[in-house]
Image (spheres, rainbow, N blue to C red):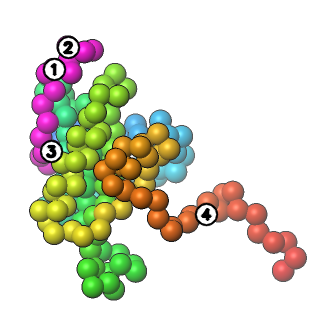
Amino acid sequence: MLGAMNNIEYGVAEIDDLPRIVEMKMAMFLEAGHGDLLAKNASTIVLEDYKRLYENKVASHFVARSNGEIVASVGVFIKSDLPFRYYSSPTYGFIGDVYVVKNYRQNGMAMRLSEDALAWLRLNEVKTVRLLASEGARPIYEKLGFMASDEMAVSYTHLTLPTNR
């Protein structure tokens, strides 16, 4: 695999690359043990959404290719939702779809593509960037300057509600 690392080409995904990017996103969910969260038609929904976001120029993916095949991807999105849309800077960047095919992992691709994604956000004058990080990915993001935030979450599938109401 080391020889294959020398043939890696980095670049920006085109709209025609989206089916492969969506395929990798679905693999990421399955590998993380979250496949049960996905709707049966999740691939179709994601593909339609991403095409619309690309057309509106509020999303992009940075990819690594080996022999023409996408083997790593990092997505970047400009979002404006509650409550952030009420702030003086109503948009924020979101990094997602970080995925590297198993045989290509631990070679710096996620870091390189994340740096490209952050540069794209800076060019688009985005001031704040958010992401969801797995435990294994935290060191990458910490090296890029990300810090844990004050956000918390609950999963209602694991929530125990009081019974004496």
Residues at circles 1 and 2 in contact by the CB criterion of under 8 Å: yes
Say which of marks 1 and 4 sits in front: 1
Where does the N terminus fall, quadrant-wise? Answer: top left
Instruction: Say above or below: 130 vs 61.
Output: below
What residue is disc 3 on? 13
Where does the C terminus fall, quadrant-wise? Answer: bottom right
The percent coordinates of residue 106 (x first, y second) are: 35, 28
Query: Hey, which quadrant is residue 94 in on the image?
Result: bottom left
Q: Is residue 9 magenta?
A: yes
- In three-dimensional space, the C-alpha distance between marks 3 and 2, rounded to whole angstroms, equals 24 Å
Badge 1 or badge 4: first in the primary sequence: 1
Q: Is residue 22 magenta?
A: no
Q: For the residue labelled by badge 2, is the local secondary structure a helix, a strand or a loop?
A: helix
| Residue range of the region highlighted in magenta in the rendering | 1-15
Q: Which mark is residue 6?
A: 1
| Kind of residue at disc 3 | Ala
Near-viewer residue (126 or 36):
126
- In three-dimensional space, the C-alpha distance between marks 1 and 3, rounded to whole angstroms, equals 20 Å
Q: For the residue labelled by badge 3, is the local secondary structure a helix, a strand or a loop?
A: loop
Say which of marks 3 and 2 sits in front: 2
Q: For the residue labelled by badge 1, is the local secondary structure a helix, a strand or a loop?
A: loop
- In three-dimensional space, the C-alpha distance between marks 4 and 3, rounded to whole angstroms, equals 34 Å
Badge 4 or badge 3: first in the primary sequence: 3
Q: Which mark is residue 31?
A: none
Q: Is residue 100 left or right of residue 10?
A: right
| Kind of residue at disc 2 | Gly
